[in-house]
Image (cartoon, rainbow, N blue to C red):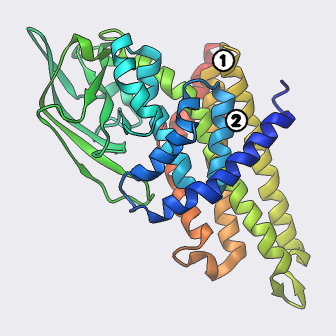
Amino acid sequence: MPVFSLDPAQTAWCAELRALGSERLRPLAEKGEPGHVNRPLVAALGELGLIGRLFDAGALDLCLMREALAQTCTEAETALALQGLGAHPVAAFGTAGQRARWLPEVTAGRAVAAFALSEPDAGSDAAALALEAVPESDGWRLSGEKRWISNAPEADFATVFARTTPGAGARGVTAFLVPADRPGLTGSPLDMLSPHPIGSLLFDGVPVGPADVLGEVDRGFRVAMTTLNLFRPSVGAFAVGMAQAALDATLAHTARRAAFGGVLKDLQAVSHQVAEMATRTEAARLLVYAAAAAYDAGAADVPKRAAMAKLLATETAQYVVDAAVQLHGARALQRGHLLEHLYREVRAPRIYEGATEVQRTVIAKELYAR
């Protein structure tokens, strides 16, 4: 399939997802409490088969899902993506027992997952993580803190990355599947700008054993990077969806808003701004699709493409949403306005799953390596 064109079935599916977002999921999202897991919304995503599709679909399908939902219900998009991010390591690296225990619960929307990589002093520099896995006769005990973890502390389990070999950098990290009811595991919510749940997890000698390892001991960084390489282009798709929603709102507003003896769109300064917003959004969309298609094809340059897609799409979305607010004026700053909501949502993707600066570092490293 050409990366610059969707086939009729894909186009129809995206339209169906947008309709589900506005008609079925948006009402549930509006009943949720900001900063907390919206379990009825997660359950609805499971009932609609969208969570299950995360683990069967390729990267392009994942991007189409996230972009379409982001246009009509960012909360549903984020809840879906977080289920995928937290549980993808289980689907890709888990044992038969781990998959049988957790994946049916996740896909049905009954269990909430978390991806616990970031720490107070190891965000962008993920290889510097310090959550300690102290060996004992039958496994390890985890001690330390994870912070800025989506769905924490309310998730039912987390994919947790801990240091099993001190001083080994990325080579000494192991991924563990840690259920929320393990003794010594506590957490607290963080009051953040974006409305989805984010918190910290505290590990006070939390016991884990060989049956909890995802993948191989000391090879957990591969689990993390494999997951991020899949989800980075789809973060870009989320951003493109938000940019498109802001663009659509701007087109409608500027076409009808009376000003200076006409409507706003008649002003060249306005129409040229809208043209720039549309062009940048389409460019970001195409780069996201290209990165996803490369992932699905098993291309060697996926890390570079994924980083480029996330970089351009998230920076573009920030620009488009900000421009949309400017063209709407004061009404866009009112609590509850679509653009006020998007303005809070759009900032975080430039930081999480690798900040913009990290993406540039990845791109440059890949370029010079070749």
- To which residue does mark 2 refer? 288
**Can the viewer see residue 351?**
no
Estimate the x, y position of residue 276 in percent, counting from the top left: 81, 57
Judging depth in this view, the residue of 117 and 359 nearest the camera is 117
- 357 relative position to 102: left or right: right
Judging depth in this view, the residue of 262 and 55 nearest the camera is 55
Is 140 situated above or below 198? above
For image coordinates 37% across by 39% down, the residue present is 112
Estimate the x, y position of residue 348 in percent, counting from the top left: 49, 51
Identify the disc placed on residue 301. Answer: 1
Estimate the x, y position of residue 41 in percent, counting from the top left: 47, 51
The kind of secondary structure element at disc 1 is: loop
Identify the disc placed on residue 249. Answer: none
Instruction: Name the image quarter holding residue 286.
Output: top right
For image coordinates 51% across by 76% down, the residue present is 335
For image coordinates 74% across by 29% down, the residue present is 290
The kind of secondary structure element at disc 2 is: helix
- 136 relative position to 179: left or right: left
Task: Determine the residue located farthest toward the bottom in the rendered image.
Answer: 261
Is 124 situated above or below 41? above
